[in-house]
Image (cartoon, grey):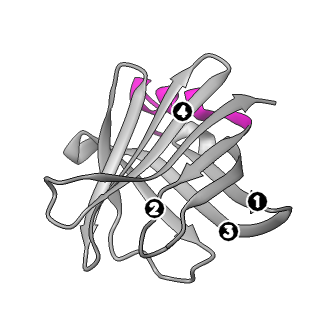
């Protein structure tokens, strides 16, 4: 049977429970922007080949958004791949693909709504996360920024 390699093991950097503050910029999905509290629960899965993340966002004392991520290593293309599902109910049009650069994992994809990129920077007991969007892949705007601590 195959064994997880170094690329799979690097995903364990995300493992743990993380809570933090988030800032949302005005956008078509969040016209007024605002602040929230984000919670991640990342765990290794399927014998270490993947990491699974469950996410929830709270605003004004209510859970208003949930997400579920599956991230793995795609050896044939030498890229990380993420499948994301959330409480908007949209089926992902495509996976997001990317790489680790130092302590930052960045994945992205393009769909009918534009280009999207997700980044997690892991520094010990802290993760910084951002989601950026672009209509054309060159002019990016930040949709969400969060800073989380391990709990």
Q: Is residue 92 left or right of residue 16?
A: left
Determine the secondary structure under disc 1. strand
Which residue is pictured at 51% across the width and 33% down the height?
Answer: 11
Of the numbered discs in the image, which one, if any, rests on residue 128? 4
For the question of whether residue 45 can be seen, the reply is: no
Q: Label 3 to label 4, Cα distance in Å?
A: 19 Å
Q: Position of residue 36 (x, y in %)?
A: 69, 54
Q: Position of residue 149 (x, y in %)?
A: 71, 29
Q: Label 1 to label 4, Cα distance in Å?
A: 17 Å
Which residue is pictured at 57% across the width and 49% down the height?
Answer: 23
Marks 3 & 4, CB-CB < 8 Å contact: no
For label 2, the residue is 83
For label 3, the residue is 65
Marks 4 & 2, CB-CB < 8 Å contact: no
Q: Work out whether mark 1 precedes mark 4 in sequence or the reverse, and give the earlier one.
A: 1
**Start-end of magenta stretch:** 1-18
Q: Residues within 10 Å of mark 2 (few under 14, many from 20)?
A: some
Q: Work out whether mark 2 precedes mark 1 in sequence or the reverse, and give the earlier one.
A: 1
Which residue is pictured at 75% across the width and 61% down the height?
Answer: 59
For label 1, the residue is 58
Q: Label 4 to label 2, Cα distance in Å?
A: 20 Å
Q: Work out whether mark 4 precedes mark 2 in sequence or the reverse, and give the earlier one.
A: 2
Determine the secondary structure under disc 2. strand
- Nearest the eye: 72 or 88: 88
Determine the secondary structure under disc 4. strand
Q: Nearer the viewer, mark 4 or mark 2?
A: 4
């Amino acid at each position: 049977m195959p064994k997880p390699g170094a690329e799979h093991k690097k995903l364990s950097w995300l493992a743990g429970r993380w809570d933090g503050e988030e800032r949302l910029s005005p956008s078509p999905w969040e016209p007024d922007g605002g602040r929230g509290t984000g919670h991640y629960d990342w765990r290794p899965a399927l014998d270490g080949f993947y990491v699974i993340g469950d996410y929830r966002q709270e605003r004004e004392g209510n859970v208003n958004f949930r997400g579920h991520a599956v991230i793995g290593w795609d050896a044939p293309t030498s890229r990380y791949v993420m499948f994301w599902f959330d409480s908007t109910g949209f089926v992902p049009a495509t996976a997001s693909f990317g790489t680790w650069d130092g302590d930052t994992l960045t994945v992205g994809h393009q769909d009918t709504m534009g280009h999207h990129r997700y980044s997690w920077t892991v520094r010990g007991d802290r993760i910084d996360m951002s989601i950026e969007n672009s209509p054309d892949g060159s002019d990016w705007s930040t949709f969400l920024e969060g800073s989380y601590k391990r709990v």
